[in-house]
Amino acid sequence: MDIQLKRGLLDVCVLSSIRNADSYGYQIIKDMKPYLEMSESTLYTILKRLEAAEMLTVKSMEHGGRLRKYYHITEKGLGRINEFQKDFQEILSIYRFIQRGDDA
Amino acid sequence: MDIQLKRGLLDVCVLSSIRNADSYGYQIIKDMKPYLEMSESTLYTILKRLEAAEMLTVKSMEHGGRLRKYYHITEKGLGRINEFQKDFQEILSIYRFIQRGDDA
DNA sequence: TGGTATACATCGTAACACGAAGTATTGTTT
DNA sequence: AAACAATACTTCGTGTTACGATGTATACCA
C-alpha cells in the first residue's frame, strides 16, 4: 500500500486495536499485520503521539518478568474513530470522482 | 478531512483530474474542490512531483495573453490510478477492521 | 482607480513513517 | 551450555510532504 495512504489510516487502526480490550505494543502489531503492516519504531512513535493527544492512557505492568505497557483508549480516542468514519464517507465520494475522472 | 488521509488521496485525485482531458492548475483546483480542497502551493508542488515521476507531461500554451501550463497524463500516471484502485480494496478491508475493533 | 479572478512560483516549517541500532529478558534448539 | 529466535520497548536521523505566507503578473469589471 502507498505510504501516504497508510499515514492516514495508522492512527485510527491503532486506536481500533485497543478499543475492545486494552493491549500492548507487540500485540497491536500482530493484530494489525493482516491489514496494515508497520515497523516497531513507527508504532511506538504513534502510541506516544496518541498519548500526548490524550486519545489513550498507559499503564506499565509486569508480565513474565518483563515490562509491558498496556494502552487504554479514552473518550477522545473513541471520538477520533468516529471522525474517521465521517472521513470514510468522503473517501467513498473521492473514490467515485477518481473512477469517473473529471467532473463530467 | 484529516490531513494525513488527504495526503494519500491528493496525487491520485490530481491525476484523475487530467485523465479524461488535459487541464491546468487553476482548473484542476476548481474541479477537485467539491471533493478535496487544496491550496495553490500544494497543487503546484504536486504537479512538479508528478512531472518528475513521469506521471504527466507539461505543455506551456498561451491563453488570452496569459501563460497556461497544460498537463497531460502518461501511461505511468494511469498506472498510478490503477494502483490506487487496488489500494482502495485494502482500505475497505481496513475499514471493516476499524469498525470491528480487534481481531475477534 | 480599485477590486476580483486568473495563473504560476518560492520558501520555511512542522508532521510523520521508517530503517538502523540498541537494551534486555524469555524460550527453544542444537 | 551456547546459540538463536521471539518478545518488548527505545532513540536517532532522514526523506517526503501539505501548507501558509508571500510574490509576480495579467485580464476584467465597476
Image (cartoon, coloured by chain):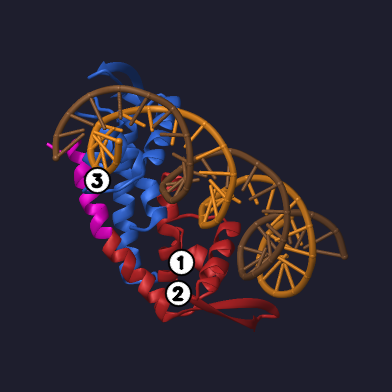
Chain colours: A red, B blue, C orange, D brown
Q: Which residue is mark 3?
A: B33
Can you say which quadrant of the picture contains the C terminus of chain B?
Answer: bottom left
Q: Is residue A89 inside the magenta stretch?
A: yes
Mark 1 and mark 2 on one chain: yes
- Residue D29, percent across and down? 14, 34
What residue is at 62 percent from the left and 77 percent from the top? A68
Residue A74 is at least partly visible in this image: yes
Q: Which residues are magenta?
A: A88-104
Q: Which residue is mark 2?
A: A18
Residues at marks 1 and 3, CA–CA distance in whole angstroms: 30 Å
Give whichever of A48, A29 is nearer the camera. Answer: A48
Give whichever of B25, B51 is nearer the camera. Answer: B25
Residue under mark 2: which chain is it in? A
Q: Which mark is residue B12?
A: none
Image quadrant assignment for residue A36: bottom left
Residue B21 is at least partly visible in this image: no
What residue is at 24 percent from the left and 46 percent from the top? B33
Q: Is residue B89 inside the magenta stretch?
A: no
Residues at marks 1 and 2, CA–CA distance in whole angstroms: 7 Å
Tell me which amino acid carries mark 2: Ile
What residue is at 41 percent from the left and 24 percent from the top? B54
- Whether tag 1 and tag 2 are in contact, CB under 8 A, the answer is yes
Q: Which residue is mark 1?
A: A14
Mark 1 and mark 3 on one chain: no
Disc 3 on helix, strand or loop? loop
What residue is at 50 percent from the left and 71 percent from the top? A53
